[in-house]
Every structure is written in C-alpha cells, then in structure tokens.
Image (tube, rainbow, N blue to C red):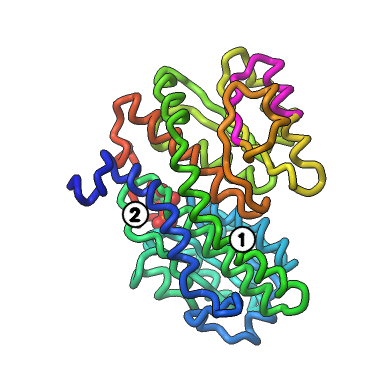
Amino acid sequence: AAAEKGGYATFMEKEIHDQPHAVADTLLGRTDADGRLVLDEMSISEEQLKAVDRITIVACGTAAYAGMVAKYAIEHWTRIPVEVALAHEFRYCDPIVNERTLVVSISQSGETMDTLMAVKHARELGAITVSVCNTHGSTIPRESDAVLYTHAGPEIAVASTKAFLAQITACYVLGLYLAQLRGGSFADDAQSVMKELAQVPGKIETLLGRMDRVKEIAGFMADTRSVLFLGRHVGYPVAMEGALKLKELAYIHAEGFAAGELKHGPIALIEPGQPVFVVVPSPTSEHGLHGKVVSNIQEIRARGARTLVIAEEGDEAVEPFADEVIRVPATSPLLAPLLTVVPLQVFALWLSTAKGLDVDQPRNLAKSVTVE
Ligand code: G6P
C-alpha cells in the first residue's frame, strides 16, 4: 500500500503532489504544432458547436466548483452565456434547454447518479451533451454525445484534489476550443492562453515546494471551530472549494463567501481570532478587483480576524494586513484557480492530520454517490 501511495502517508497527499501531471496530461495531445486546439474526441459537428448559444454546466460537489470557475473563463473567451446548475437541482427547475444548448457535465467518477440523471434529462430536452470525466468507460460519458477526458489518473482519496485541477483544465480547453471555432480575435486569444496554460504545471510544482508553512499553520489549528474563506471572481469558487475541503476532511465549520458580499452580512461573523483565508486576485486583474479585496482584508483585520492571505508573488499591497502570506506564482487572472486552490487543499490535509482523522476516508462520505 505504501508503494501505491508513492511514498506518501495518504492517497490525498500523493494526489495533491500528482497535480502538475494531472494538468499537463489533460493538456497533452490537444494542440497541434501551431498551438491550435485539436479535439479529435469531440464527436459533435463543428456546425452544431458553432450554433451553440447557451451553455449549462451540471455537476455536484467539487466538480460543481470547477464548473463555476469554468463559467468565468468560458464566458470571457466565447461570449456565450454559461450557467452552472447543481445536477440534483437541474431537473426540477424547468431548465431552459434546446438543441442549441450545450450541457456540459463534470464528474470525476462518471457514476454520480444526480449528474447522470441531469444529463439524461438534458438529452430528452434535445440538448447537446458533453461529459468532462476522469473515468474511462463510465456511465456518464456513455450517455453523452461526446466526452472530454481529464487525465488525472485514478483518484482514490474521497476528497477530490487532482481531479478538480484536471476538470478546470479540461473546461478551459473546451472553452478555448469553442473560442477558436468562433474565429477572429477569439481564436487569437485561444492560442495565447494555451501557451500560458502550458506553463502552469511547472508553477504548481514550484508552489508545492513551499507548502511547509501552510502545514505548520494547520498543525497549530486542531482546536479551531470555524474558518472562513473569501474570494472574488474566479477566487470565489476557490474559496468555496477551500471551505468544502475543510468540512469534508477536518469536520470544521467552514464557509466560502464572495468577498464583495462581506459587508452585506458575513462581516458580522468576524470576531477577534476568527481565521479567514483570503484568495487575492492578481494585481493585474481588471476593474480594480485587487484593491477591493485588499480593502476587505483591511476591514476584517480591523475587527480582529486572523488573516491568512493567498497572494501573487510580488504583491506587496497585502503585507500590512496579513497575518500570514502564502505566495503563489503569477499567472493570468482566469488561470489562477489552478494555483490558488493548492494551499487550501494542503491546509485541509494537514488540519485533518493534526486532528488525527482519516484523511482518505472521511466519515459519512463516499467517493462516488450512485443514488439520488
Ligand atoms: C461525492 C464526493 C465528492 C465529489 C462529488 C462529485 O460527493 O465525495 O468529492 O466532488 O461526489 O463526484 P464526481 O465523481 O461526480 O465528480
């Protein structure tokens, strides 16, 4: 069993370290020599894909957060409206779906019953269905018009890590492919983003090499009863994924909020000593988002929060208000989730370990839920 874990104590730790490969392998073979996307497996005609005027992503749990990240990216690159629905809600909300709707399901296992039923319902309504899936030959890809496999390799730990990064990567590939089909400036963007994406696995590797402090912080926090996570734009689903990891693994009450929502309620939760992770957008983000999140850190710090700040290398503006700064390599704002989520996974892993819990098999959870 130790060999299966690649020398790590748990599958989760191994899988966190597999992440540079999960991203690189998911990109592999999907571009030609000129850097243009080629998706041979996309068994849907270009005409049909060009006619798509609405995208709905259906998924559960971590996969749904990957979908939320994808929404920001795909809308930006293609200008096609994207909606994310929890798969178990989709069927019951009288969804607006027709032949021009692309329904993208995201599932690591390909067996999640809620997601499968959403895909079947979408097909009944005439939608085009694409499955983003990590498991060859599983049910959801078989029930879909096309499949884009994530190449994360088998994920054993119940809490998802490398599959999440691979799902985000595959969704970027899909979004950029749709952008390329649209042509013109959309296609130019696709090629430059693919180049940047190719740099990400190396950056994840660098980041993994500096997680000692995160492990140490987690080690001191075994008695913590609540942790909050703030993020904005693509950092918002990252915040929610960070909170989910902590619920799943450490059984600690945790919530992820959109940082802009803070003043509309959640700031009332801040009391002295409350730990708050803040996922800070890159200083290169549009619309002054970075400055707004720095102000949020200042506001919660003034009320006694203990601020654990995830910020890009060289972002000095966060220093005065951060109790801890966790540095991530710079990348373009839409790709940042592939980096910013990593310290949150590592934090949950070591906090669970500090509490003496079973990291790979948390209580009450199953790796794949095959009942509705
Ligand atoms: C279960 C797992 C989660 C996972 C979710 C969706 O609840 O415990 O970790 O995110 O199912 O799984 P899927 O296989 O569809 O991605």
Dot 2 or dot 1: first in sequence order is 2
The range drawn in magenta is 295-310
Nearer to us of marks 2 and 1 is: 1
Can residue 151 be spotted in the picture?
yes
- Tell me where residue 18 appears, x and y as whole percent: 38, 52
Above or below: residue 283 compared with residue 24: above
- Tell me where residue 248 appears, x and y as whole percent: 41, 37
Q: Residue furthest right?
A: 287
- Tell me where residue 62 appears, x and y as whole percent: 48, 49
Which quarter of the rendered picture does the C terminus lie within?
Answer: bottom left
- Tell me where residue 53 appears, x and y as whole percent: 71, 73
Tell me the SS state at disc 1.
helix
Q: Residue at 62%, 85% (x, y): give it.
A: 46
Could you tell me how far apart the alpha carbons at marks 2 and 1 are, in whole angstroms? 26 Å
Residue that carries the numbered disc 2 in the rendered image = 155
Above or below: residue 187 compared with residue 110: below
Q: Residue at 69%, 44% (x, y): give it.
A: 282
| Three-letter residue code for mark 1 | Glu
Residue that carries the numbered disc 1 in the rendered image = 196
Can residue 88 be spotted in the picture?
no
Q: Residue at 40%, 60% (x, y): give it.
A: 152
| Three-letter residue code for mark 2 | Glu
Q: Residue at 72%, 34% (x, y): give it.
A: 293
